[in-house]
Image (tube, rainbow, N blue to C red):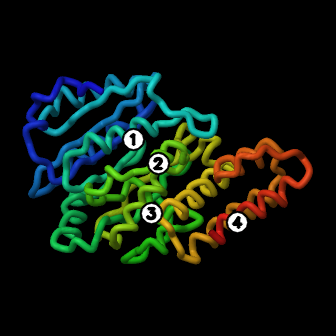
Amino acid sequence: MQEFLGTDKQVNKTDPVVSVCVVTYNHKHFIEQCIDGILNQKTNFPFELIIGEDDSKDGTRELCINYAEKYPDKIRLFLRNEKDKIWISGSKTGRFNFIENLKAAKGKYIALCEGDDYWTDSLKLQKQVDSLNGNEEIIGSYTDTYVKTEDYEELKYWREPLQPTMTLNDVIDKKSPFHTSSFLFRNKHLEKLPDWLNLVPSGDMFLFAYMALYGKLIKANTSPTVYRKHEGGVTNSSIHNNQGFHIGRLFLWTKFKKEYNIELPKIDEVIRFHASSLLNSNMSISDINLVLKKIGFTQTISIFGGRSLLKSTIKRILTK
């Protein structure tokens, strides 16, 4: 993927400590606040802003181009193509854009922020890098996050104020342990990402747990980031709601358990939760077959015994 304005810009001639990766699609009304919050960061080290613009139809691309032309010392812009988008569970996603941004990152650390979210603390990057420097046992850092909805201006905590440290056991959970917009992590294990990441709806949940394989995560003392929840947001898509949510998480944690030989009781508890939620819903036989296929059971079943087969398959996975 060719970089906008080429690789002879000033930003390409620096050695960034942090690469801030932004994926954006149809974020015309939000992207400027996102980019400004990143460009306003005050640091004693250089950082690059990598923007992956995913072929928007609403003018977002033009705004990103304007910023890239104005800040060639900070921004590396990649203009993705519609044909490269990856389909997951029947929905078109920004997974290709997300992974390609990570591959382009040159910094020792990577920070994330989606184009409809934003940062409120101009010292966010500095505080997070300071918290990791000199302690290789710490693999990443997170912060609290507010949620902002379209019909309510007041900012509220997206999660209750978070605990000061997290391990793999904390990150593996029924819900996301912290928000993507708050995460900064060491960029030294990404070459080992599994191919099946392209099939996981919640790529950020995988990344949180994957990083926690290599070390501890700590909370930075910064102002909360802001997660903007709106009708066009990713979490409102079909793959993140109702049965789609449970199917995706069941796939994630069963694959994660097998890939990395995870023996924690917590991962079995989370798998059972998502399996039970599906079994207690009005799942069609086609949905049950989809779940079984995703977690490695290739035999197609009929209407008879569908739920019991799903239950026994989950049990078999948990006892491996």
Quadrant in which the N terminus appears: top left
Please identify, in this view, whether the residue under mark 2 or under mark 1 is nearer the observer: 1
Please report whichever mark, 2 or 1, sits nearer to the chain's N-terminal start: 1
Please report whichever mark, 1 or 3, sits nearer to the chain's N-terminal start: 1
User: Which image quadrant for residue 131?
Assistant: bottom left
Outermost residue toward the right in this view = 304
User: Which image quadrant for residue 166?
Assistant: bottom left
Residue denoted by label 2: 228
Q: Tell which of 304 and 31 is nearer to you.
A: 304
Please report whichever mark, 2 or 4, sits nearer to the chain's N-terminal start: 2
Note whether residue 154 is visible.
Answer: no
Q: Secondary structure at mark 1?
A: helix
Please identify, in this view, whether the residue under mark 3 or under mark 2 is nearer the observer: 3
The numbered mark at residue 98 is 1
Please report whichever mark, 4 or 1, sits nearer to the chain's N-terminal start: 1
> How far separated are the C-alphas under marks 2 and 1?
18 Å
Q: Is residue 83 left or right of residue 282?
A: left
> How far separated are the C-alphas under marks 1 and 3?
17 Å
Please identify, in this view, whether the residue under mark 2 or under mark 4 is nearer the observer: 4
Q: Mark 4–mark 1 contact, CB under 8 Å?
A: no
- Position of residue 23 measured from the top left corner of the image (x, y, whole percent): 38, 39
Query: How crowded is the residue under tag 4: few (<14 C-alpha within 10 Å), some, or many (20+)?
Result: few
Please report whichever mark, 4 or 3, sits nearer to the chain's N-terminal start: 3
The numbered mark at residue 81 is none
> How far separated are the C-alphas under marks 4 and 1?
33 Å
User: Which image quadrant for residue 221?
Assistant: bottom left
Residue sitting at 54 percent across and 44 percent down? 199
Kindly identify the amino acid type of the residue bearing the numbered disc 3.
Answer: Ala
Q: Is residue 268 left or right of residue 35?
A: right
Kindly identify the amino acid type of the residue bearing the numbered disc 4.
Answer: Arg
Residue denoted by label 4: 316
